[in-house]
Every structure is written in C-alpha cells, then in structure tokens.
Amino acid sequence: MIALVTLVVLSGITLSILLSAYRVLFGPTIPDRVVALDNISTNLVAAIVVFSIRSDSALYIDVALVIAILSFLATVAAAKYLLRGTVIDNGSAR
Amino acid sequence: MDLLVSGLLLVGLFFLLTGTLGLLRFRDVYSRMHATSKSTTLGVTGVLLAALLYLRFLGLSSGLKESLIIGFLFLTAPVGAHMIARAAHRAGIPLWQNSIVDELKAYREADHTAAEPISLTAPADPLSPPPLEEEERM
C-alpha cells in the first residue's frame, strides 16, 4: 500500500513541477519566474522525502534539508538582485 | 500505520497541487506568491510528517531532521515570499488591474510627503557651540 501511494504522490509532484515549469519558461515578469523556481524547489524537497519513504531509508532526508536551505538562499539572492542590481552589496553600488 | 502515512502523503500532495494550480491560474505576481508560499509549506509539512511517522515506526530515524526541515520551512517560506514581493513592488511590477488596495504604494508615497516638514535641526541650546554650516553638516 505504501508503495502504491508513494508512486501516486511522486507522479503528482512530478506533474506539479512540470506545470510550474510553464511559469518559469513563459512567466510574464522576472518575479514570476523566481516564485515558480521557489515552488519547484519546494516540490523537489517533498519529492525527495517521498522517495525516502519509498526506499525505506532515512539517508535522503539530509538531501532534502540541504535543498531546502539552498532554495531559501537562492530566493534571497534573487530578491536582492531584483532590488539593487547586485547580490553582495558592499555600499559602492548605488 | 500505513493508513495514517498514506493519508498524510495524499494531503501533502493535495496542497502541493493546489499551490501549483494557484501559481498557474492567478492574475499577478503577488496573488501567485500568496498561493504558493502558504500551500506548499503545508504540503511539504504533510509529506514530512508522513516521513517522520514512517521512518520512526521502522526505527530508521529519530525524527529530528524531519522536524528540523519543518521548522526551517515555516521560518523561511514567509521570509522569502516577502522579500520577492517587496523586490517586485520596488521594481514596479503592476498589480492586477482590478485590485482594490495598494497599501505599500500609499505608504511610500505618503512617506515622501510626510518626511518634508519634520525638522532635523535641534532647538537652540545656549550652552552648546553654534551649529555648523550647511555644507559641513552634510
């Protein structure tokens, strides 16, 4: 039963990632693409956790944690870039 | 046990798909972000609770890392969404044409006009030396 449910959930998460990829590719504005990429990475964390359940192993939880942290860093960097034009602001830019 | 884990997984999948549906169907950046940030947080929380129960039941994990990811997501998802929304508003991305209220724009426009009458010079103090000239103070 767990095998069937995890297969269904993994398929659903894959569908969700593919639908979000539409917004990344054809999003009207740049923040749309950033939001869609954030959504994709969050879905990816969920997919890795589901795969961890499916393979009866706790190793993939670490991978999910690292991807969650990297996704937050990427979102913050993109927001800083949209806001100021640079990522690392040392005071000389504007 | 299997029923509980499966139910949590399906609830998580429902919330993730709802967030993606909102990302596709809503009208502007801000409402899309409103859809994705909250519902994907709940979806990942459901999936992680399922993983916590299942791996804890099998004796493979203590459940600490799953709880850590849940707490991390609850902290960072609103912060990231707020930063993107602020950057988008600052970059001049327009709201949907039928939006009713834009409080941040009103606040920023009012802030520019309200900052003028406030005087930055201290009242005259007879014991202190005379104030500097304008160029030196700048």
Image (cartoon, helix red, strand yellow):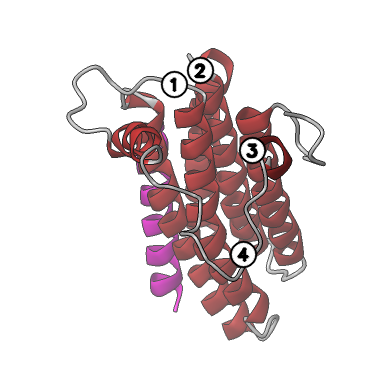
Left or right: A54, with B16 as reference point:
right
Q: Residues within 10 Å of mark 2 (few under 14, many from 20)?
A: some
Q: Which residues are magenta?
A: B1-23
Q: Which residue is mark 2?
A: A29
Q: Residue at x 64, y 38 (%)?
A: B134
- Secondary structure type for disc 1: loop
The answer to the question of whether label 4 and label 1 lie on touching residues, with beta carbons closer than 8 A, is no
Q: Which amino acid, mark 4?
A: Ile
Q: Are marks 2 and 4 on the same chain?
A: yes
Is residue B23 placed above or below B6 in the rendered structure? above
Q: Which amino acid type corresponds to the residue marked 2 in the rendered image?
A: Thr
Q: Return the residue at label 4.
A: A53
The spot of residue B37 in percent (x, y) is 44, 47
Q: Nearer the viewer, mark 4 or mark 3?
A: 3
Instruction: Work out whether A57 lies above or below A11.
Output: below
The mark found on residue B63 in the picture is none
**Mark identifier at residue B134:** 3
Which quarter of the rendered picture does the C terminus of chain A lie within? top right
Residues at discs 1 and 2 in contact (Cβ within 8 Å): yes
Which label sits in the foreground, 4 or 1? 1
Pick whichever, B31 or B19, lies toward us.
B31
Q: Residue at 42% x, 38% y: name it.
A: B33
